[in-house]
Amino acid sequence: MSLPAGLYWSEQGERACQDHTPYPGSDSWRSGRWAPVPAVAMPELARTHGADAVLCETCAAKARNESNASKGRVRPRKVTQ
């Protein structure tokens, strides 16, 4: 099942785009009570919680990591033996 484009949120406050939500109808989808964020709520979310509140958490993290890598700000991995 494919979801329409847009932002979704769970009852726990998680935010995700259609590519990063749990599979619709799955246990995670139902228990999280995922639903589309109404377009009319977006400006209020951004105003009260900041611009990141209207972004998919996974997409935003990927963009931050790519930005840091391009600026040479990648933390070295710990070597474990």
Image (tube, rainbow, N blue to C red):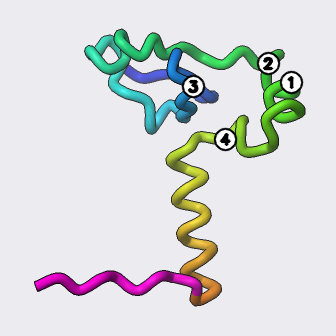
Alpha carbons under labels 4 and 3: distance apart: 12 Å
Circle 2 residues within 10 Å: few <14, some 14–19, many ≥20: few
Label 2 near label 1: C-beta < 8 Å? yes
Name the amino acid type tagged 1.
Glu
Closer to viewer: mark 3 or mark 1: 3
Circle 4 residues within 10 Å: few <14, some 14–19, many ≥20: some
79 to the left or right of 69: left
Which badge, 3 or 2, comes first in the chain's sequence? 3
Res. 13 mark: 3
Q: Residue at x 50, y 31 (%)?
A: 18
Badge 4 marks a residue whose secondary structure is loop
Name the amino acid type tagged 4.
Leu
Alpha carbons under labels 3 and 2: distance apart: 14 Å
The answer to whether residue 59 is magenta is no
- Label 1 belongs to which residue? 44
Circle 3 residues within 10 Å: few <14, some 14–19, many ≥20: few
Name the amino acid type tagged 2.
Ala
Query: Which region shows up in magenta?
Result: 73-81
Alpha carbons under labels 4 and 1: distance apart: 13 Å
Closer to viewer: mark 4 or mark 3: 3
Label 2 near label 3: C-beta < 8 Å? no
Name the amino acid type tagged 3.
Gly
- Label 4 belongs to which residue? 55
